[in-house]
Image: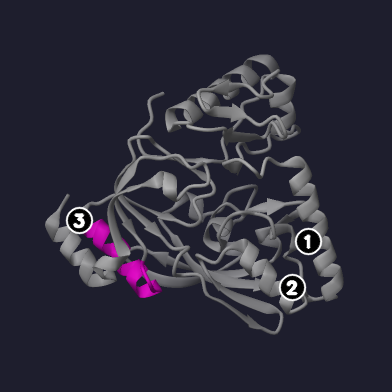
Amino acid sequence: MSDRFYRRLSEITGESNIMTDEPMNRHTSFRIGGPADYFITPESTVQLCETIELCRSFGVDYIVLGNGSNVLVSDKGYRGAVIQIQKNLCGIRVDNDRIYVEAGALLSKISSVAVSESLTGFEFASGIPGTFGGAVLMNAGAYGGEMKDVLESADVFKPGEGIVEVSCSELKLGYRTSIIKHSDWIVIGGVIKLQKGNKAEIEKRIEELKAERNEKQPLDVPSAGSAFKRPEGYFAGKLIMDAGLKGYSIGGAAVSEKHCGFLVNKGGATAADMKKLFNEIIDIVRKKFGVKLEPEVRFIGEFEE
């Protein structure tokens, strides 16, 4: 651990916003993960960008983390800096039919603000347990809606260049992907454009989606949401169920009995357990049906294959 790096980092964010050897099971929805060398919570966009540039100049690996809802962190942790934006960079502002948000704003909170302003179009995201930045990165979607349907533009930080505004079309949002996912760009914030609607109808639709999620998804146990992308022409959950893997477990990691598209931590699961479960599901489904499942979850840190 570099004392010089730590001193410089403290000058940027203040020591109160830096933790060392921080267990990542405290910050991921899987409740799994070993310690990160540095866990940083910048208080402003300027601090975020300066922290990234500092990591680059010192050769320190880094990742930007939102709500930790779509990641599996290795049991060995992460040798580098985890920069968490959900705590402080979560501002939301409304101007007529547009919502201006910072990258760390939770989708559920954005949805609540939209409801309060009688704005419709964001109902699909009301139950997605992530942040705006992560949602743009992977073009998050549910129940027939996607971020590309409502995103007008995003502010992104290009390391070495600065912050630029990028239109939705330039982001090349596709099924669970974007140009950001394949670059070193970092989402800083953006603009969502919605339509004026009937508040009671918006609230009713959100309650309907909430009830459907509660009925079909294992929301009472730690998971990372949908574990796999939807293969073209198939549904991942059905393939896993048809492969006879409902409830299949390795250690504390298991295929949900409620929805086979979810992998859950039923208690005491390690990252090794969960990664092995991912690998075995992929292998079994490929052998049985000739379909290769692709994880929707990001794997962070060092894993043994």
Query: Is residue 242 located in the magenta-colored stretch of the structure?
Result: no
**On the rendered structure, is 128 left or right of 64?**
right
- The answer to whether 65 is drawn above or below residue 242 in the figure is below
Residue drawn at 74 percent across, 73 percent down: 115
Res 249 → quadrant: top right
| Disc on the earlier residue, 3 or 2 | 3
Residue drawn at 59 percent across, 35 percent down: 264
Q: Residue furthest left?
A: 4
Query: Is residue 56 located in the magenta-colored stretch of the structure?
Result: yes
Question: What amino acid type should be assigned to the residue bearing mark 2?
Answer: Val
State how far apart marks 3 and 2 are (Cα): 44 Å
Indicate which label's residue lies in the foreground, 1 or 3.
1
Tell me if label 1 and label 2 are in contact, CB under 8 Å.
yes
Nearer to us in this view, 194 or 212: 212
Q: Which mark is residue 206?
A: 1
Highlighted range, magenta: 42-58
**On the rendered structure, is 174 left or right of 242?**
left
Residue drawn at 69 percent across, 32 percent down: 236
Res 244 → quadrant: top right
Q: Secondary structure at mark 1?
A: helix
Which residue in the structure is indicated by mark 3?
A: 58
Q: Position of residue 257 (x, y in %)?
A: 70, 29
- The answer to whether 17 is drawn above or below residue 143 in the figure is below
Q: Position of residue 69 (x, y in %)?
A: 54, 49
Which residue in the structure is indicated by mark 2?
A: 115
Q: Residue furthest top?
A: 287
Indicate which label's residue lies in the foreground, 3 or 2.
2
Instruction: Answer yes or no: is residue 96 visible.
Output: yes
Q: Secondary structure at mark 3?
A: helix
Question: What amino acid type should be assigned to the residue bearing mark 1?
Answer: Ile
State how far apart marks 1 and 2 are (Cα): 9 Å
